Amino acid sequence: MATVSTVFVLRIIERLSDRMDRDMLCRVAGLDPSPSAGPPPAMIHAANYYSLLETIAETETPDIRFLLGVSMSATCSDFGAVGLAWKSAPTLRQSFLRMDRHARAYNTASTFKLSDKGDTFWWTHRRPDTPRLGLDLSSEGALATYVTLCREATGPNSKPGAVQFCHPEPAGSRELLEAHFRCPITFGADIDALIIPAERLDKPNLVGDESIWKFLSAQAEGMLPAESGDRQLDRQVVLQIADVLTDGIPSLAQVASDLGMSARTLQRRLSDQGLTFQALVDQARRETAERFLADTRYSIAEVAFLTGFSEQSAFTRAFKRWAGKTPGTYRDLTAAP
């Protein structure tokens, strides 16, 4: 069942407590407002969260105005060790890679992923729920919050190159969103995404410190529920391998260190899922190769180098084993004109 962290819900209700009935908002969100109810649950049903946003929109304003205020007030510390690991990461790339792994601890209704598109990186957001106003508002608020966290980590002038949303353009929201994101915004796209120029990802964060980042990452790792964490561990390893392929195939120990855990821990977790590090290396190489083969600006020899092969012939044999066809044939079938 899709869930959303109660942290978001309580911050929204707190900001509205002087203008709307707090108990009513709690009940819409599926929370017990009575003093004897005890601490709220860590997560609520995503559908209840969408209903909360729709209830607020009916009373306050149908656009993103209120939710943007909540998103702009977010801080890294609101996300505990994960948020502080984001802030202390040496670069924004490492911030996103950490959140790539841990986002589901706060939102199981969505899938976030950092994807390399060559000149840009896309922080993508997928949410399979049935379209509704609350879902659209939630999607806008989620990406707006990530931009706020980027600004805390890298400085107030940080902005994506572009932003896109799947849902149609809502009335009265474009100007508000453009003022927050400070970049072009597209609606009706195939996927929600923050689009970030590649060079911005590797600039140092303001208070980036590798030793502190690894310490906080290890803490975050320990707090992550095994079910939600291990579900995406293979994806995290693949992304980490793909990120350094041009420098050669990384060792398991190197990848484990970059993910803030020991080599033994990574080996054990992969084994528990029936995975091997070599299989994930192959997956990273294949995905990277397919991406570059689809771009005819790169020769097949260059694609071989970019995927960690010293010879084109070895790359051709490996790719044929993965895809059942040679790199040249794959390119003919998939390359964009």
Image (tube, helix red, strand yellow):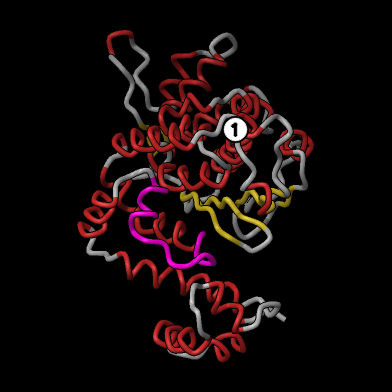
Q: Is residue 160 above or below residue 319?
A: above
Mark 1: secondary structure: helix
The x, y position of residue 166, in whole percent, is: 62, 53
Q: Nearer the viewer, residue 308 or 333?
A: 308
On the image, which quarter does residue 159 sit in? top right
Dominant SS of magenta comes to helix
Q: Nearer the viewer, residue 329 or 95?
A: 95
x 47%, y 53%: residue: 128
Q: Is residue 278 above or below residue 177?
A: below
Quarter of the picture holding the N terminus: top left
x 59%, y 87%: residue: 333
Q: Is residue 94 left or right of residue 57?
A: left
Q: Is residue 172 left or right of residue 327?
A: right
Q: Which residues are magenta?
A: 243-259
The x, y position of residue 263, in whole percent, is: 29, 52
The x, y position of residue 227, in whole percent, is: 27, 47
Residue 48 seen in the current view: no
Q: Which residue is mark 1?
A: 153
Magenta stretch holds residue 17:
no
